[in-house]
Every structure is written in C-alpha cells, then in structure tokens.
Amino acid sequence: MKLKLGFAAALAALSVASIAYAEPKKGGVIDVATVGEPPTLDAMVTSTDLVGMISQHIFETLYTFDKNWNIAPLLAQSLPEISVDGTVYTIKLREGVTFHDKTAFDSADVVASLNRWLKLAGRGKQIAPNVKQVEAVDPMTVRITLAQPYAALPALLAFNNSAAIILPSEKQADPMTEVIGTGPYQLKERKPDQYIQLTRFDGYKPRSEEGSGYAGARNAYLDEIRFVPAPDASARLEGAVDGQFAYTDSLPVEQMGRLANAKSEPVLLQNFGWLMMRMNAKQGVLADVKVRKAVQKALSETDMLAAAFGDQKFYAVDGNMYPAGYPWKTDVNVKGNYDVADADASKKLLSDAGQKSPVPLRILTSRQYEFHYKMALVAAEYLKLAGFDVKMEVVDWATLTQRIQNPELWDIFITHSPFLPEPALINILSPTTVGWWNTPEIASAMTALTGTTDQAKRVAAFGTVQSLIMEQAPMIKVGNFSALSAKSPALKGFWPSPWPSFWNVSLEK
C-alpha cells in the first residue's frame, strides 16, 4: 500500500477504497506497536504525535479534519458562526453525546475544557492573550470572543495534539487524574511499558455523516485496541514481518524490502512530513542568534538525509517549509541558509558571538525513531568541524519529551512533523512552545498571518514567517521524508494517515 499522489489526494483515494465493502461485524482485538511509552494520555499538555495517535480514540475535539484536510465538526453540531469582524465565534454543540463516565456533554464541559486548554496547552497559550471570554450561551451553545480576529482558531480547535480535548467539567485536574472522554474507545487499563488497553464505548454516538478522514462517523467495530510500546525499531520490524501486530508504526523505510513476503503489508506515506533540529532559543549558547546561525551554516542536510534514509526515493533535500502542492510553498530566504556546510562561515559567526572554540553543544535524540539518531550522528560531525564540542545524549522518546520542557537540559533536539494544512499549527511558531522563539519580528508576522481571512495576504505573511525562520534560526528544517509502517492484511477499512486511527476499522475473520 503506497501513497504516490499528492498527500491529500492520495489519502482521499485510499479512504474511498477502504469503505467499499459491506458493513463490518463487530469484534476482534488488535495489537498496535508504537515507538514507545507515551509520557501522558493528556493530549492537551503535549504536542507529541504518539500521544495524539492514542488519545484521539479516547477524547474528542469540537472540530477535526476530513480526508481533504478541510475543517469539519466533531463535537460541534456544525462549523462556527463567525461575526462580520471575525472576533466572535458561536458554536452549537451536538445533542445526546455522553462521556465515558455516563455524564451528559454540554456547554459547561466545553467552557471548562477550553479554559484549561488556554492555560495548559502550547497551542492554547498561543491564542490565550487574544481570548477575551469563553462563555456558555445556553446548555448547547458556546461563544468565544476574541480581542482581534484570528483566522486559525478553528484549525487550532481541530488539531489532535496540544489539543482542545473536551473533558467533563468536574474532571479538569492538572495533571489529569481520570482519563474520561467522549470518544469511541475508553481506557480500561494502562500498564506502563507493557500496553494501553482501550475497549469499545458502547454509549458512543457516532456522527451521521459518512466517515471521511478524521471526520464523520467514528464506528467502533473492534472490541479492543492494545497499544504496545516497542521502542527498538528492529524489534518492531521483526514483529511486523512475523505478523505479531495488526499495525506497526514507524519502521525504517530502507527496510521496506523485508515486508515483501511478510505477514504484514507495507503502508508507505510518501512525502509524509519534514524533519527538524529544534534549538533552545531561551537558555544556553543557542539563546544567541549568531550561535544558532553558526549551527545552520555548518550542516549538510544532504548528508544527514542520506544517512537517515539511504535511498533518495524516501526523502527530498528541501529547505522550504512546505513542498509543491501546498499554497504555502515559498522559496524566500532559503538559499544561503540551507544545506550550506561551510565550517569557516560557522567559525566566524562563533567568533563574532564571542565564543571560544570548542563551543559546548548538547544534542538530545532517541533511537526509537532511528532516522533521528542517524541524522544526529552526521550533524555532530559537521558541527565538530565548525568548532563545536558536541555531546550526544540518547534517551528513550518519553524521556526526551519530558526533558525538553526544561531549558536547562538541552540545546538541540531532533523531531519531525507532518505537513499541516494550517501553518499556524506549526508549534515552533508559538512563543510558549518548546524552543521558546519569541521575537518582535515573528510576533508581528504571526499577527499578519492570523489576523485576516484574505488568502493572498495570508500566503504573503507566511513568506515573511519562513524568511524569519531562516534569518533567526529557531530551528533547522532538515528536509522532507516518507514514512513507513505496516498492517495486517486482515485489518480492513484502515485509512493511512499521519496519526493512525482505528475507528471504522475491522478484522476480517
């Protein structure tokens, strides 16, 4: 199973194909191999994709995305009514929805949850200064009033990590003490480093629309989903080859040939997303933009990608924040700030910053995503040539996601992201997210990006955003990549996507 078309078009085609069979029967248990143990199940407090993938079965948001990445209602009855000046969003809620604890869903739950999101979530904090009030108009209507227009609000409310999940109004503890949502599956048991067991929520009320991506009906055909941490990439691959898992996440793409005669079939998302080296702009040597630029000038992204993926069919050397096919694609300010590999230029920047060689630099990475680790190894060698004293810190993914919250503990970490339909969702653009990039220039550019619904103006504003990313180097985009996973041939109705979901999925007997 391969995606060879544009991302949205390919997913749409696969989605249509996946539902072309008779209504499935309920039943069955599946094991899903993940890259590791999630640090939490509270999708508000982390932007980790692993948490988003698992928690989306338990919790729901007001909005979500359909197969073409259009915003669609989920717990909301319909798309919001927006005032002429763009500052007031009125949201009607669905009737008859219940939480896993059997309590009824209403506007009080939404108000409490959105206020929690504004306080705790990186994406919530991104917009919190602009939110004047979140209020219940009546039991099934909520109103959000902004100080200034913010075109990206529906997309923020739709996203599944750092997510505006809706919890019972009485269960808003921080940290989360009870895992209670409205989703098609509910938490039954969590045994750390063994499994997270979800069972069908028989009180779930699916939407009436046909399933489309993350939108529409979410039918829980499976009796049980068990997310099993398998941190070692080789172990995940062998498990997929042997048919140990119904779905295996994040396999090394260069090992795709191993699945040719395996008991699992490959699922390749071509041009899946982009890789980045996130820099600590708040504390340590990289708080100085000249030192960040020195890192930028030192690297060969070409060599990093070749080491990580081997075959060029699995990656693209591309410094643009978006590839061809997206309205946000722009070449602005990439030349001279990407794939430079100029040790002398890097050394000069370090000298101009008053740094004496060797400059200590900590790179935090994990082998649970093996391509992260391989890129880090190559980056370290180029940085050493430029006068950095690089210390590689290799930890499990859960530890990494916790450690990066403390700016004292790292300088660079390596991560990745799918290409997102709304650029304001890119979490480095929030001044409160990990990395803490917060300058007057990016604040002004983000105001221009989100303060209008005029698409031409928004595209131009994003050009400024990309230019600033290149100029101020809060992170380094390494390139684009394809992602490989594997599924059992018996798993029917599965929709390949950045955050695999297992509603509308059944087991063929």
Image (cartoon, grey):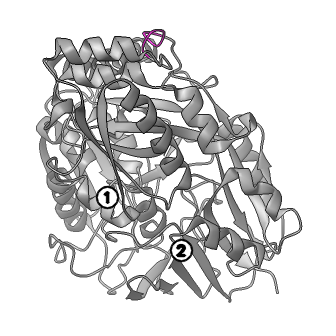
Q: Are marks 1 and 2 in contact (CB under 8 Å)?
A: no
In screen coordinates, is 176 left or right of 197? left
Residue 313 in which image quadrant? top right
Q: How far apart are the two marked residues, 1 and 2, measured between alpha carbons?
A: 17 Å
Q: Residue at x 35, y 11 (%)?
A: 345
Residue 419 seen from this side: no
Q: Determine which residue is flagged by label 2.
A: 230
* Quadrant location, the N terminus: bottom right
Q: Position of residue 227 (x, y in %)?
A: 52, 78
Three-letter amino acid code at disc 2? Ala
Q: Position of residue 430 (x, y in %)?
A: 25, 36
Q: Reply above or below: 317 against 221.
A: above
In screen coordinates, is 381 left or right of 290? right
Which residue is nearer to you in this view: 52 or 447?
A: 52
* Quadrant location, the C terminus: bottom right
Residue 369 seen from this side: yes
In screen coordinates, is 36 left or right of 440? right
Asked if the magenta segment contains residue 107, the reply would be no
Secondary structure of the magenta portion, mostly? Answer: loop
What span is in magenta?
332-337
Q: Badge 2: how crowded within 10 Å, few (<14), some, or many (20+)?
A: many
How many numbered circles does the render carry?
2
Q: Reply above or below: 26 against 121.
A: below
Mark toward the start of the polypeptide (1 vs 2)? 2
Q: Reply above or below: 19 against 194.
A: above
Q: Position of residue 442 (x, y in %)?
A: 24, 21
Which residue is nearer to you in this view: 9 or 334?
A: 334
Q: Residue furthest right?
A: 261
Report helix, strand or loop for mark 2.
loop
As drawn, the label of residue 401 is: 1
